[in-house]
Image (tube, coloured by chain):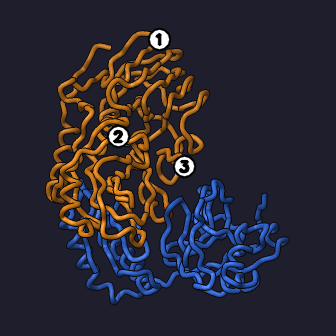
Amino acid sequence: MELHSVGENAMMLYLGEQASPEVSARVQAAATMVESALGDDLVDLVPSYASLLILYDALATDHLSVAHRVRTGLRTLGDLATREGRTVVLPVYYAPEAGADLEALAERAGLGIDQVIALHTGVEYRVYAIGFAPGFAYLGEVDERIAAPRLATPRQRVPWGAVAIADRQTAVYPATSPGGWNLIGRCPVRMFDPDANPSMPVSVGDRVRFEPVSRDRFFELGGELE
Amino acid sequence: MSFRVTQPGILSLLQDGGRYGHHRIGLTNGGPLDAEAFYYCNRLLGNPPGSTAIEISFGGTRLEAQVDSYICLTGADMPMHINGREVPGWQVVPVRAGDEIALEFARHGCRAYLGVADGFDIAPSFGSSATVMREHIGGLRGDKLHTGDTLPCRAVAERRCLSLPARWRPLYQQHVTLRVIPGYQQSRFSRLQQRRFFSHSYTVTDRCDRMGYRLEGPAISCEIDGILSEGICAGAIQIPPDGQPIVLLNDRQTIGGYPKIGSALSLDTAHLAQLAPGGTVHFAPITPHAAHNALHLAHSFRQRAPLQEQQP
């Protein structure tokens, strides 16, 4: 574990070198610990794959005090029950009309479309990080047989709900935006709704499973195809 | 009771102190690029710090007052006229319903803050009115100001017409020194690369916006192309594979995978954001101790800089 000052009000805590469910669980436990250790001095937290960025109120405290409180808290971290995230099931309509890259991805993988769907739905993913855009959850890890590099030329417009793969990560686009991931289906659930509470169906550390649904069921659940 | 936008200018955004506590769902902080000028705007008006004001980039904005109140313009030197009569910046001035407020283009600096007594009354989104256009959140409809927009505020009958004397005001020059706390992947940049970074001047390119300022100068190489994505604080200096530094600002993405050499002090990024393309930048390393002291002194200075009462 390493803790460094990285800015005038920022310390970075590294909890591992690589993404793994164990490291992700440590990041979650550390986030909970830091919240209680810093209380009102904490301004914001950015948990990611193997690190936790801690933003503190530099007019109320300082890097020495923050480092002391975080290090003290880390000593007891092993005793904390790891918060096991919830499992969230997200419905997906997998079809070429809903995922423009589904056929090409299957062809490159030497698999049938049904096999791609089976591999994508056969894994329980972990939410490693949320970023890029509000509600964009990075889920890992995709079975290596259907891992696919980002598109050479990103699309100008990826629709909200697009289910996509980049390398061994998968995600559901929370809003219509540019994007370079391989599109394989559409999810009718809004991954980010500023008017809902909570505004996201998942948090960092949760588990996600995808469940294939029919075209009709997709529309019943509020899905859209253009 | 409100102000009506009759001409939005190039980029006018409602901003408060920023949106904090939601990085975890990918929301960035937004807020004023020049926190110093924004602070003085509210202090002069007697508003609580962080009251909502308009951040006007480059100028060209016109408003019509539909209320009797007081306004104040700080930041970039953007000549302001009320009904054709020039009124000073860094000073609280009264306005009456029907007045036309017109801002010219900035002569020095490029971000100005136009505040109103008691602040604009904008419904917060995730606890803040800060507009982040990339996220479609904050302000009005998550967007910049448009012609015809109504900016609600209270009628205020009495307010002292305070000004910040010229000698206390920041100077916006064409060159800015950014004090940098080395950190993040600093150790993955060789000594030679670090020396190059800290000893050369870099120029602001035309790719400069609220997400970040992309600079151009001697390329800095890093031992690694990318890292496992991690949280990015405001002011972080990212070095992408082309070696040209990007100073990340208020609307940056919250996580990213490019190596970073350190983070610039907010006191200095406030002045960086006043640079237009062609402006130049130097980096100077400082310790976290020195950064902490600088923040406290600047805060104390801003709170105590003497204000003068003017005849309205």
Give the color of chain B as drawn. orange
Q: Relative to A80, is A197 on the left or the right?
A: right
Q: Residue at x 53, y 15 (%)?
A: B98
Q: Pointer 3: what residue? A: B137
Q: Relative to A45, is B145 on the left or the right?
A: right
Q: Residues within 10 Å of mark 2 (few under 14, many from 20)?
A: many
Looking at the rendered structure, the kind of residue marked 1 is Asn
> x, y (%) of residue B234?
35, 54
- In the rendered image, the quadrant that contains the N terminus of chain B is top right
Q: Pointer 2: what residue? A: B273
| Figure chain in blue | A
Asked whether residue B136 is in view, the answer is: yes
Between the residue at mark 2 and the residue at mark 1, the CA separation in whole angstroms equals 30 Å
Q: Is residue B152 placed above or below B163 in the rendered structure? A: below
Q: Pointer 1: what residue? A: B83
Q: Relative to B251, is A16 on the left or the right?
A: left
- In terms of sequence position, does the residue under pointer 3 or pointer 1 come before the other? 1
Q: Quadrant of residue A144?
A: bottom right
Looking at the rendered structure, the kind of residue marked 3 is Ile
Asked whether residue B160 is in view, the answer is: no
- In terms of sequence position, does the residue under pointer 2 or pointer 1 come before the other? 1
Looking at the rendered structure, the kind of residue marked 2 is Ala
